[in-house]
Image (spheres, rainbow, N blue to C red):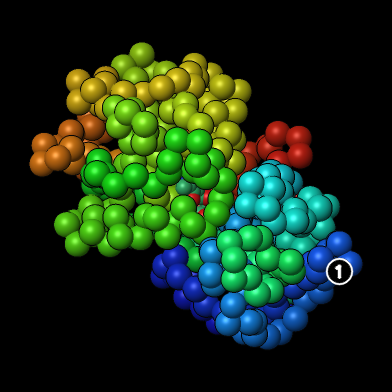
């Protein structure tokens, strides 16, 4: 099997159509998902009045396939993405896709695009984007009758330019989630909410926005596309607690790595912006499937710069260890906890 002729090391995080995508359909008439299959066509034809186009009825996931050091193609904890897609769908009145079908679809998409899976050691990976959307017409505000599930794959490089280089972010005056809203699920509407804020952040020289808790605006939550990790002065890994942040699979995995591989103490708790201002954290990072771990070197808080001790030159020691261990597990260099690695072939 010959790999595509791509300069893998220079890929950015952008979309390149690949050969195969998986498609399954749900109709109210049958009351179930069909068995689904791989197709070649990357275009979708649907009603001008489809539920997704009118009321943004869509949920999605993101996960990656890697080539391991011994040449296998693997995915990382796809069952977790399947479960999260299931609960995201339930929250938006979308018929959930069975988790087993989700896992099978990921397997098929990766196998169908194996020539697009970046080789080991290139720093690139195959990003898989599964999603479900309302495809039948709706005009009054209501869920659609019929849905489509798709999963496509695209080879990607680092989400933030420069990969593991520290980034400069800001505290946002916009909110991405509402109290008791949809911040905890992976729905397109949460990202639509963040688009103006991210364009404005980029215009002003910041890589991302840190959102505050929408009820009191005193606690830090997450960024537009990643959770936040902090290391305090006692070398404890602190992860923010909130009902309106996305439960990141990367974060859940890093918490396990911190406790069981690195012997760190981990605390999940509310984190006040005032603690950041007071310099209580020596390292800050963003984590997610796309971001892996990106160190934060500086945080702009309404014109005032909070300088993180690890600085803007390089990643701090704890974030470096966390990142290396997680990538080592994903790429088969470090033994993985039971059930984390799904070997495709
Ligand atoms: N938070 C947001 C808002 C995200 O979009 C993502 C990306 O999926 C994450 C956190 C990280 O989640 P995960 O580690 O499951 O990719
Ligand atoms: C991911 O990390 O998979 C995401 O969905 C984040 C997105 C902003 C690219």
Dividing the picture into quarters, in which one does residue 61 lie? bottom right
Name the residue located 74 percent from the left edge and 66 percent from the top edge. 145
Q: Nearer the viewer, residue 338 or 148?
A: 148
Q: How many marks?
A: 1
Dividing the picture into quarters, in which one does residue 228 lie? top left
Dividing the picture into quarters, in which one does residue 73 lie? bottom right
Q: Position of residue 336 (x, y in %)?
A: 68, 37
Name the residue located 22 percent from the left edge and 29 percent from the top edge. 309
Secondary structure at numbered mark 1: loop
Name the residue located 17 percent from the left edge and 57 percent from the top edge. 204
Residue 104, relative to residue 296: is it above or below? below
For mark 1, does the 10 Å Cα neighbourhood hold few (<14), some (14 to 19), or many (20 or more) residues? few
Q: State which quarter of the image contains the N terminus.
A: bottom right
Q: Residue furthest top?
A: 234
Ligand 2 within 8 Å, label 1 CB? no
Q: Nearer the viewer, residue 331 or 285?
A: 285
Residue 333, relative to residue 141: is it above or below? above
Q: Position of residue 264 (x, y in %)?
A: 49, 19
Q: Left of 309 or right of it: where is 37?
A: right
Q: Which residue is mark 1?
A: 29
Name the residue located 59 percent from the left edge and 66 percent from the top edge. 140
Q: Left of 51 or right of it: where is 310?
A: left
Q: Position of residue 30 (x, y in %)?
A: 89, 67
Q: Is residue 337 visible?
A: yes
Q: Left of 236 or right of it: where is 50?
A: right
Q: Is residue 163 visible?
A: no
Q: Nearer the viewer, residue 303 or 190?
A: 190
Residue 16, relative to residue 260: is it above or below? below
Q: State which quarter of the image contains the C terminus.
A: bottom right
Q: Left of 116 or right of it: where is 223?
A: left
């Amino acid at each position: 099997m010959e790999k595509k002729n791509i300069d893998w090391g220079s890929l950015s995080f952008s979309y390149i159509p690949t050969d195969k995508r998986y498609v399954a359909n749900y109709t109210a008439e049958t009351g179930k998902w069909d068995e689904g299959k791989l197709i070649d066509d990357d275009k979708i034809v649907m009603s001008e009045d489809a539920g997704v186009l009118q009321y943004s009825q869509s949920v999605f996931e993101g996960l990656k396939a890697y080539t391991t050091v011994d040449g296998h193609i693997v995915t990382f904890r796809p069952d977790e993405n399947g479960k999260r897609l299931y609960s995201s769908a339930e929250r938006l009145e979308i018929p959930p896709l069975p988790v087993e079908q989700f896992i099978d679809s990921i397997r098929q998409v990766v196998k169908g695009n194996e020539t697009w899976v970046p080789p080991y050691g290139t720093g690139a990976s195959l990003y898989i984007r599964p999603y479900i959307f309302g495809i039948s017409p709706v005009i009054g505000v209501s869920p659609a009758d019929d849905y489509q599930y798709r999963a496509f794959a695209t080879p990607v490089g680092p989400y933030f330019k420069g990969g593991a280089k520290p980034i400069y972010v800001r505290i946002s005056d916009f909110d991405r989630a509402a109290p008791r809203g949809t911040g905890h699920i992976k729905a397109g509407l949460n990202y639509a909410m963040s688009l103006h804020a991210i364009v404005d952040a980029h215009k002003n020289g910041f890589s991302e926005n840190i959102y505050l808790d929408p009820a009191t605006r005193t606690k830090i939550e997450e960024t537009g596309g990643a959770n936040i990790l902090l290391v305090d002065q006692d070398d404890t890994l602190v992860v923010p607690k909130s009902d309106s942040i996305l439960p990141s699979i990367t974060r859940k995995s890093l918490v396990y790595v911190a406790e069981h591989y690195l012997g760190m103490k981990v605390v999940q708790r509310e984190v006040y912006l005032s603690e950041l201002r007071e310099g209580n954290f020596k390292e800050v990072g963003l984590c997610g499937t796309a971001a892996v771990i990106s160190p934060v070197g500086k945080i702009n808080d309404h014109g005032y710069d909070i300088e993180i001790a690890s600085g803007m030159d390089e990643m701090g020691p704890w974030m470096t260890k966390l990142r290396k261990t997680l990538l080592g597990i994903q790429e088969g260099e470090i033994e993985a906890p039971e059930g984390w690695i799904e070997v495709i072939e």
